[in-house]
Image (cartoon, rainbow, N blue to C red):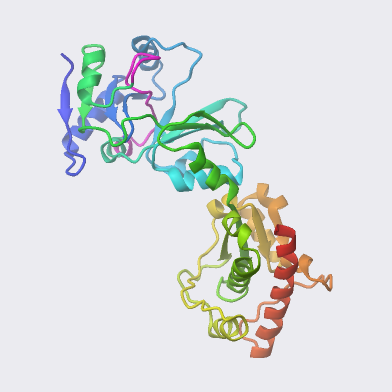
Amino acid sequence: MTKRIFIDPNNIDYSFIREAVELILKGKIVALPTETVYGLGVAYNDRAAIQRLYKIKRRPKDKPFTLCLADIEKTTDLFSILPPFGYRILEKFWPGPLTVIAYARGSEDKIGIRVSSHSVLNAILKELNTPIYLPSANISGEKDAVSAQEVENVFDQAIDLIIDAGPVQFSKPSTVVDLTYHPFKMLREGVISLKDLMLVFFKKRILFVCTGNTCRSPMAEYILKKIIEQRFPYILERYEIISRGIISLEDTPANFETLKILEEKEDIDASSHRSKKIDRKTVLSSDLIFVMEETHKDYITSLEPTAENRIFPLKKFLSTDSQEDIVDPIGKSYEVYEEVHCLIKDAILELIDWLS
């Protein structure tokens, strides 16, 4: 009989975690829990273990297995560049019951990846510090195992260890979405519905960028949000509007002059704003990026060159067709802040006609 170990997800015994890891590293097959169904795990680079897995699952050799990782950030090293929507679904549904298929980095071959939310599985993956293949614990085409007992009923003596973490959360498989199609193709509707994915797809992300994210970009963010809410509520659900800075002033409020202008001239309370520095993940996930200066565009393209065709200087939307950047008012008079506010609002009013 295959050995079966119980690990409490709420009180993980790491001696059992290490036992599972040692077996996987030795080329063994270990049944592992996820939040959806149980899976059969093998080292992704162990050819003999992979061939054995195909055999016991009776799975055609032309159907590749999905990789499973614990670290979302490491998936970007495996995928080629995704569309912005792709990064937003990873942001929303990972860790969780979603399998994403995309092109492998530097290749035209497809690769499937899953980042599970199951604490026991992730403890094993972190200890391994390497991906595993983790197809569902079933004979191909038959019912998925949703408990350790069901795994044992089907694969007793055919596998090397069963990690029992109790019943799974959902008892249905992960949703599988293929991002090599435009805009995407759902290959299997599981826990996450097509509607869930479409809501993320249709809500485009607009990003405003300035230097410190304490004056110009929050000003643009809050003004655009207010105008959409008041004048164009029918497009309210179509856009997520955020702002960032290119230098590190993390968690700093908008400055006094910006807060005063937004309150007095726009009746906007922006006191809850806290600055954030832009990062590559935010760039990749944004559909439209508006910058106050050309240097901001240069900085963003240094983070991610493929974003260049999604970056627009806000000055291009000014009715005066000005070629001057929207200057940084930090350290200047209140009158300069007022001038900057007027320029940003003029550009936003032109921009919103384009959006709507």
> Could you say where residue 33 lies in the image, as x and y percent from the top left?
28, 31
Instruction: Name the residue: 26% across, 37% down.
Output: 120
| Left-right relation of 354 to 43 | right
Quadrant where the C terminus sits is bottom right
Depth order, front residue of 348/329: 348
Picture quadrant where residue 23 is located: top left
Instruction: Name the residue: 59% across, 81% down.
Output: 262
> Could you say where residue 290 lies in the image, as x and y percent from the top left?
67, 62
Can you see residue 55? yes
Most extreme residue toward the right is 321
Picture quadrant where residue 228 is located: bottom right
Depth order, front residue of 257/304: 257
Could you tell me what secondary structure mostly forms the magenta stretch? loop
| Left-right relation of 6 to 265 | left
**Magenta-colored span:** 125-143
Instruction: Name the residue: 66% across, 77% down.
Output: 328
Residue 305 among magenta residues: no
Quadrant where the N terminus sits is top left
> Could you say where residue 182 lies in the image, as x and y percent from the top left?
64, 35
Residue 142 among magenta residues: yes
Can you see residue 76? no
Query: What count of labels does the image hold?
Result: 0
> Could you say where residue 221 lies in the image, as x and y percent from the top left?
60, 68
Picture quadrant where residue 192 is located: top left
